[in-house]
Amino acid sequence: MSKHYDVIIIGTGPAGLTAAIYSARANRSTLVLEGPEPGGQLTTTTEVENYPGFENGIQGPELMDIFRKQAHRFNAETVYEIANKVDFSQYPFKVFSDAPNEYTANAVIIATGARAKRLGIPSEGKYYGYGISGCATCDGFFYKGKKVFVVGGGDTAMEDALYLTHFAESVTIIHRRDEFRASRIMVERAKSNPKISFLLNSVIEEYLGQEKMNIKSLTGIKIKNVKTGEITEHAIDGVFLAIGHTPNTDVFKGIIETDEVGYILTKGKTTYTNVDGVFACGDVQDPIYRQAISAAGSGCSAAIDADRWLTEHH
Ligand code: NDP
């Protein structure tokens, strides 16, 4: 099947769906390819308390459902398909999906997001979102008076640990080496905080948890000292993974300019990429803020940029 749209948005989440609302409401025929994780990273979280407009908080998947319904209200189409190839060398642009379908579009908005790296050990999937988190800013608040671990030795680990001291009783930074990738000033700041301690040359071997009345929760971890091989067990309430993010840009490799990590480079304060008519918004171009609200904001910008670009070029 081949179908043409004014705007194709690749990826969902707050950025893609906000772009869809704005684009469809600007009367542009709009298609969203939802990708492998419809609704994006928020669907792997539970309570979202910092998205403005929901004073009592809202569940992540429910929030994304509302975004999607709002986009549908203005006739944006959404399909559960993954964009597995793009051809931006000809116009209109071509987007191929795993359905398999072939679409053409006058403008494309990339909103494929990023994913927090995971350790990839057994039971991580089971407790992810139930004691294991990839975002301290999002979930730190739930750990008031609790014992938490932060995994990693980079700036994010230091920053997350410092942030978590506002809530947690104790924060332990567990790092696989005894040298840090983080800047010295961040390490010093973490070291001088009385709530923060360090466990070096150590890795998490296993997550321990319980399931009571269908509610899962993390209760501890098994840790291995990589130098001595010694295994210890720790009773804790939360683990924050700060081992980096991976932007979802494989499909655009060699076509859309990225930084060395893979984040799409946008021009100045706009959402323009190096390809005229292709825009990027949300976490796929944001290694800094990575929040639902900032992603939604940039989704709005991308739809406005695309709409204005189409007006000028058609
Ligand atoms: P980094 O890639 O800098 O650090 C990742 C850390 O996670 C490393 O210490 C790495 O260990 C560890 N790690 C990676 N994989 C594993 C694994 N499988 N098991 C255990 N540990 C693992 O990522 P960050 O997110 O910290 O930072 C990304 C970029 O953003 C950096 O350039 C950073 O400077 C910047 N940043 C700046 C901030 C600021 O200035 N305020 C705040 C946050 C980020 P190892 O060192 O052994 O490789």
Image (spheres, helix red, strand yellow):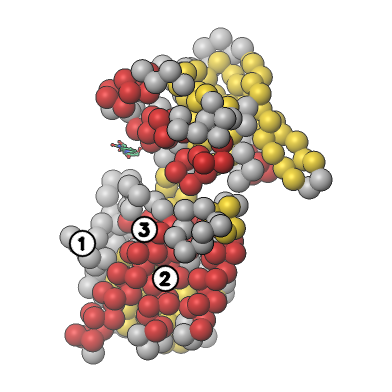
Q: Which residue is pictured at 68% across the width and 43% down the height?
A: 126
Q: Which residue is mark 2?
A: 18
Q: Which residue is mark 1?
A: 269
**In this image, 157 relative to 298: left or right?**
right
At label 1, which amino acid type do we have? Answer: Lys
Q: Please name whichever residue, 102 or 78, is drawn nearer the observer in this view of the structure.
A: 78
Amino acid tagged 2: Thr
Distance between mark 3 and mark 1 Cα atoms: 13 Å
Q: Position of residue 71 (x, y in %)?
A: 48, 78
Left or right: 54, with 205 as reference point: left
Can you tell which of label 3 and label 1 is closer to the viewer?
A: 3
Q: Secondary structure at mark 1?
A: loop
Q: Judge whether 286 appears above or below 296 on screen.
A: above
Read off the residue under disc 3: 294
Q: From mark 2 to mark 1, how far is it between C-alphas? A: 18 Å
The answer to whether any part of residue 104 appears in the image is no
Mark positioned earlier in the residue sequence (3 or 2): 2
Residue 307 picture quarter:
bottom left
Res 303 → quadrant: bottom left
The disc, 3 or 1, on the residue closer to the chain's N-terminal end is 1
Q: Position of residue 280 (x, y in %)?
A: 32, 65
Q: Quadrant of ligand 1?
A: top left
Q: Residue at x 50, y 77 (%)?
A: 70
